Amino acid sequence: MNSYDVAVIGSGPGGYVAAIRCAQLGMKTAIIEKYATLGGTCLNVGCIPSKALLDSSHHYEDAVKHFEEHGIEIPGDVKVNLEKMIARKQAVVDQTTGGIDFLMKKNKIDVYQGLGSFKDATHIIITGEQTTEIEAKNTIIATGSKPSSLPFINIDKERIITSTEALKLKEIPKHLIVIGGGVIGLELGQVYKRLGAEVSVVEYADRIVPTMDAGVSKELNKVLKKQKFKINASHKVKSVERVGDEVIVKADNKKGEEVEFKGDYCLVSVGRRPYTDGLNAEAAGVKLDERGRVEVNDHLQTNVSNIYAIGDVVKGAMLAHKAEEEGVFVAEILAGQKPHIDYNLIPGVVYTWPEVAAVGKTEEQLKEAGVDYKVGQFPMRALGRARASMDIDGFVKVLADKNTDEILGVHMVGARAADMIAEAVVAMEYRASAEDVSRMSHAHPTFTEAIKEAALAATDDRALHV
């Protein structure tokens, strides 16, 4: 039987990063993955493939709607070859997961393919083509999450689908009904909207992306409606039925009236649930909470001292980069170091176009906490760079403490927001004030100038270009 300092169960961004950091710190490390490829949901059926399709569909939309304005004329019709688009997406996935294979070899991490189940707190049985048992002084549970559903929905994976199936459709839907106006539903909705589908979003909350700042939500709603999305907030779905090639969704609107939506596909994107099936956590004595998450303390340690858990399977935002930070954190704890994670500074991103990104507190949270704050907001359309690329939707909003000027939250909608949010994370990690950021030189013309201008607006209402 092989013995290890650390075994990691699950090879998503949390798991594989944890394994790499453990190996870097001199621990003999194994990683266990039940699927044929490494990388978990994110690399195989999540973050990476969805970005590939978002990119391809964006190119198509530009060719159809915007090239002429740029003086680019394409004779004949521009056509979508969905099969080729899906194949390119798969090539990106294959290259990315292959990169993880390389990293495992480079760091001398033993990879086991099969389902990892606890025999007890220090032994794991791996069931794959053959059954193997290994011993691990420490174990990191990184088993991730799966798409959630609603109790009355029968997901047939053909017409009533999850994000996994939406990434490999054989045809462009005529009318895609999206249940859930969160990140995944809006991103995949936009892919198929660009390719010609009619898209109706049905959201239970009173606004889309309901966990984000209300101002951001309102702006994105406005932009998506301009793109001809049909957004139905405050709608409680009560039945989803397939009749032949048609899906009928019935919901109650905010007045309590029944509304019916008919489409040829229905994407169920109502969140994700922690995944521990087959882990046999009870054999190791590991406790789960009432929502099926692995219970952990502030060191991400379970109630069994040599077993830790990270990522989507524990409390907190279900984000790949949060899982990565936790993977590094646990590896360094095991090595006797004293790492830290500030969960307030883990950014959230929606990869629609325009993109949406945020870090820190929302206005709603600051009001609820009774914090005196000030707001600086700057519109993207006032930027030369935004006008040059015809990306004028959105804004940057900086929230700062009214007394100390410390930045408490940054929220943005606009081109490249996903990349720009890192500037706000760095500033807040170093406890910068709005004035600090406003006094830093930003290259011209860039989208990031909107951050400087919003910081100027927050400092003393002195933005220069509005």
Image (spheres, rainbow, N blue to C red):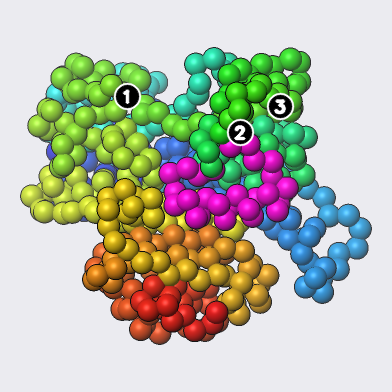
- Tell me the residue that label 1 is attached to: 291
Q: Is residue 81 left or right of residue 253?
A: right
Circles 2, 3 touching at the beta carbon (< 8 Å): yes
Q: Give the vertical position of 319 relative to 337 (above or below).
A: above
Q: Give the vertical position of 263 relative to 78 (above or below).
A: above
Residue at mark 2 to residue at mark 1: CA–CA distance? 24 Å
Badge 3 amino acid:
Phe
For the residue pair 325 and 315, the one nearer the viewer reads as 315
Residue closest to the far right: 76
Q: Is residue 113 visible?
A: no
For the residue pair 346 and 117, the one nearer the viewer reads as 346
For the residue pair 354 and 133, the one nearer the viewer reads as 354
Circle nearer the N terminus (2, 1): 2
Q: Is residue 319 left or right of residue 224?
A: left
| Magenta-highlighted residues | 208-233
What residue is shown at x 49% (from left), y 84% (from top)? 464
The local secondary structure at tag 1 comes to loop
What residue is shown at x 60% (from left), y 80% (from top)? 384
**Residue 202 badge:** 2
Residue at mark 2 to residue at mark 3: CA–CA distance? 9 Å
The local secondary structure at tag 3 comes to strand
- Tell me the residue that label 3 is attached to: 261
Residue 217 colored in magenta in the image: yes
- The percent position of residue 362, horizontal first and vertical second, equals 38, 54
Q: Is residue 24 left or right of residue 87?
A: left
Badge 2 amino acid:
Val
The local secondary structure at tag 2 comes to strand
